Amino acid sequence: MKNLKIGIIGAGPSGLAMLRAFEAEEKKGNPIPEIKCYEKQDNWGGMWNYTWRTGVGKYGEPIHGSMYKYLWSNGPKECLEFADYTFSDHFEQTISSYPPREVLFDYIQGRIRQSNARKYIQFNTVARWVDYIEGKKQFRVVFDNLVENTTFEEYFDYLVVGTGHFSTPNMPYFKGIDNFSGSIMHAHDFRGADQFTGKDILLVGSSYSAEDIGVQCYKHGTNSVTISYRTNPIDCKWPDGIKEVPLVTHFDGDTAYFKDGTSKRFDAVIFCTGYQHKFPFLPDNLRLKTKNCLYPDGIYKGVVYNDNTQLIYLGMQDQYYTFNMFDAQAWFARDYMMGRIAVPEKSLREEDIAKWMEGEANCGTSCDHVDFQTEYIRDLMAPTDYPDFNLDKVAEMFKSWLLDKEENILTYRDKIYTSVMDNTKAEKHHTPWMKELDDSLERYLEEIPADEKELSKVNYY
Ligand code: FAD
Ligand code: NAP
Ligand code: MG
C-alpha cells in the first residue's frame, strides 16, 4: 500500500475533497499511499479562488476562473454543506442560506486548513501531457513549473483528474456578429455588472449563467436585459427590465434579430452558452468526451474511467449537488484506489453506466434531475464511511429552492433553510440581497442592530 503513488490534478473543491478523503484515513492511523497534487493557479479553491484577470494569466496560461464580483451562492448553502465540517463549525455564528463567494471560499479553506494538505500541493504547476505506459502500468505525467519555467515528469499508479469543466467557453457563431459594434464576451470573462449600468444588453443562453448575470445586471442598474433562449426559456416572473425572447437569428450592426420576428438594438452581447469539457493534457484514449449532463458516458459510478480503471475523474457531472457530491466521489475513489471497493469487469461496468444514463434520459423535470443526482450520491456513499446525512431532506430543499426562484427570482436568496448536518436554522441576512451591493466577507458577517434590519426590508413587486 505504502508504495502506491497517486497524482491529483487540480486543487479546486474536487481535488481538495480527494486530499481530505486521504487525510480522514490517515487520522484513523491507517497507512495511506504517496500523494501529490498539482495546481496551475497560485492558490487552491478552483473556481472559488477569484481572479480579476481574463484571457491569460501571469504566466500565459488560459484563465481558469469564471466567477465575478458580487457572485453569491445560487443554491442554499445547506445543500452543499460538508458532512464532516459544518458551517457552524466554521463560522461559529449563524449565517444566511445564500452566502457570497468569499464566504464560501473561506468555508472551503477552513476545512482543508485543519489538515496538512497544503504540503501535498505544488502550486503554479500545470499538467501538460499524460501517457499511460503499458510496460510499467503507470501514467507518466509531464508538468510545467510556471514560476521556474521548467518541465519535469512524474509517474503515478492512479491519476485523479479534478480540473473542472466550467472554464472553456462554448461560443456559437451567429451571422452578422462579426460586425456587431458593441462589446461581446462570454460569461467566462464576465467580472461584474458595473460596466453595464445604463446599457441595453443581450444574453444568449437560458441556464444559470444567463439567469444570474441577467439578475446581477438588473440589480446594478442596466437599462434593459434581454435573454435569448434556444430550447427552453428560464420562465420565471421577470421584473420590468428583463425579458426573454427566442433565439437570435442574426445581427445587423448593433441590432439583433430573433426567431419571433422581433429585433432590438444592444450595447453588449454576453454569451451565456455554457462550457466545454476540455482536457488539453490528455490523449484521446484517456479523455472524457461529454456534454454537460448528470451522467457522462464512459465513467463508472461517475468516477472510474471505463477504458482505463487507473484513471479517476471527479466533478465532471452537471451540478445540483456540489461540495458534498465531490466528497462522496472522493471517498469512493479513495476506497477504490486503496483496494477496498472492487469494480466489476468492463462489460458489467458498461451495463451499469447505461442503466444510469437511461435514468437521466427518463427525467422530465428539474425535480426529476434533483432526485436522479440524489440517488447517484446515495449509491456512491453506501460502501464508504463518508458521514451519512439526510439526502432526502437535501433533495426537498433543492425542490423548494426551485419553487423559490420561480416565485421571485429577485428575492429567493433571502429565504432560509435548516442544516441537515447539525440542524442549525439559517438566519435571515441583515440586508435583503437586492439591496446588498457589498459582497465582502467583513460586510456579510457584520452584526447589524435589529431596528436597522427592519429598515432594510423592501418589497420588489
Ligand atoms: P474547479 O473549481 O473548476 O477547479 C479545478 C481546478 O483545476 C482549478 O483550480 C484549476 O486551476 C485547476 N486546473 C485546471 N487545469 C489544470 C492543469 N492542466 N494543471 C493543473 N491544474 C489545473 N457551485 C456551487 O455550489 N454554488 C455556486 O454558487 C456556484 N457558482 C458557480 C458560478 C460559476 C460562474 C461557475 C462557473 C461555477 C459555479 N459553481 C457553483 C460550480 C463549481 O463548478 C463548483 O462549486 C466547484 O468549483 C467545482 O470544483 P472542481 O474542483 O471540480 O472544479
Ligand atoms: P449550462 O448550465 O451548461 O447552460 C448552457 C446554456 O447555453 C443552456 O441554456 C444552453 O441552451 C445554451 N446554449 C448552448 N449552446 C447554445 C447555442 N449554440 N445557442 C444558444 N444557446 C446555447 O452553463 P451555465 O449556465 O454557464 O452554468 C454553468 C455553471 O455555473 C452551473 O453549475 C451554474 O450553477 C454555475 N453558475 C452559478 C452562478 C451563481 O450565481 N452562483 C452564476 C452563473 C453560473 P440549451 O438548453 O438549448 O442547450
Ligand atoms: Mg456509508
Image (tube, helix red, strand yellow):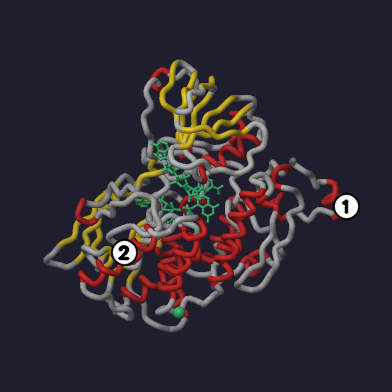
Of the numbered discs in the image, which one, if any, rests on residue 312? Answer: 2
Query: Secondary structure under badge 1?
Result: helix
Residue farthest left in this picture: 135
Using residue 374 as the reference point, say whether residue 279 is left or right of it.
Answer: left
Residue named by callout 1: 451
**Amino acid type, residue under disc 2 in the picture:** Ile
**Amino acid type, residue under disc 1 in the picture:** Asp
Using residue 348 as the reference point, say whether residue 273 is left or right of it.
Answer: right
Using residue 153 as the reference point, say whether residue 371 is left or right of it.
Answer: right
Residue 36 in view: no
Residue located at (66% from left, 51% from top): 413
Q: Position of residue 130 (x, y in %)?
A: 23, 55
Picture quarter with the N terminus: bottom left
Q: Quadrant of residue 243?
A: top right
Q: Position of residue 399 (x, y in %)?
A: 57, 60
> How many residues crowd mark 1 within 10 Å: few (<14), some (14–19), many (20+)?
few
Camera-side residue of 27 and 76: 76
Residue 426 in view: yes
